Image (tube, rainbow, N blue to C red):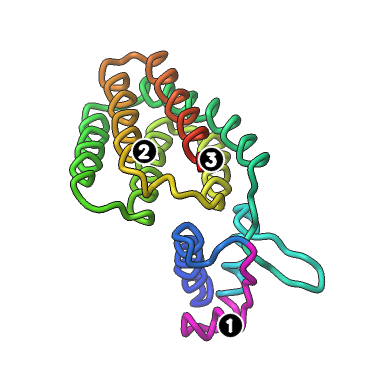
Amino acid sequence: MAECELLAESVHPTLRDRIFAGELPPGTALSVPALAAKLNVSRTPVREAVQQLINDGLAVYTRNAGAKVETVDDEPIREVFAVREMLDGLAGYQATLRATHQQVADLMAMVDSQRSMLDQPADRRRDSRLDLDFHTAIRGIAANKPLREALFRLDAQAHLYRSDMWASETNRQLVVEEHERIVAAIRAGDAEGARAASCAHVAGLAVRIRRR
């Protein structure tokens, strides 16, 4: 693999994480020269990383204006979560049928860690990452590549929606409780229960993320 490709692989997640954390808010121009200077890398890997962000649905390119972080408003976010609800339900169902004892144990450890974090102050970047990691793990167990890729794009778009959801102690508690119900169903081998719990979790997120 060429050096610029290796650099692009590191620049892409760096920019993606900064978008998710709100450090590069919606509408921010993604200037290749400026980002290259800030990250202390050449322009080529930054250009490739920005193109990946466009492919992910995290950025949009406009002729004569260049690339900028995408903006997601109320109506698009409703559509994103409506589709994600069905697909995450399918992921929970398929993960239940495929999960090994070790994978179930790993999921249980993950939600235990999330619960322990409730004793710490809210941290939007950390808490949203924990939620994403949990769902990524379940989708990985489901082993359905088209499903995983579709949900990755939906997650990316959901992170563009500015919300103070993760600042709420009640919301943080609810997320952990919902994750625990999903894992309990997977552990019990209840595929339909895992589907229902996953759908209910995403439906709840869709409501809470838009609350003012």
Residue at the image position 26 percent from the left and 16 percent from the top: 188
Kindly report the distance in space between the C-alpha atoms of the residues bearing marks 1 and 2.
Answer: 37 Å
Q: Which residue range is magenta in the image? A: 27-45
Horizontal side of 173 relative to 94 (left or right) equals: left
Whichever of callouts 3 and 1 sits on the residue coming sooner in the sequence is 1
Quadrant housing residue 29: bottom right
Where is residue 149? Give x, y as percent. 55, 42
Q: Which residue is mark 2?
A: 171
Horizontal side of 146 relative to 171 (left or right) equals: right
Where is residue 83? Give x, y as percent. 60, 31
Disc 3 crowd, CA 10 A, few/some/many (<14, 14-19, 20+) = some
Whichever of callouts 3 and 2 sits on the residue coming sooner in the sequence is 2
Task: Count the labels in the image.
Answer: 3
Where is residue 22? Give x, y as percent. 48, 61
Which secondary structure lies at badge 3? loop
Q: Which residue is mark 3?
A: 210
Kindly report the distance in space between the C-alpha atoms of the residues bearing marks 3 and 1.
Answer: 33 Å
Whichever of callouts 1 and 2 sits on the residue coming sooner in the sequence is 1
Kindly report the distance in space between the C-alpha atoms of the residues bearing marks 3 and 2.
Answer: 12 Å
On whether residue 140 falls in the magenta region, the answer is no
Q: Are marks 3 and 2 in contact (CB under 8 Å)?
A: no
Horizontal side of 72 relative to 16 (left or right) equals: right
Disc 2 crowd, CA 10 A, few/some/many (<14, 14-19, 20+) = some
Which secondary structure lies at badge 2? helix
Q: Which residue is mark 1?
A: 34
Residue at the image position 55 percent from the left and 79 percent from the top: 35
Residue at the image position 18 percent from the left and 43 percent from the top: 116
Residue in the foreground of this view, choosing between 29 and 135:
29
On whether residue 44 falls in the magenta region, the answer is yes
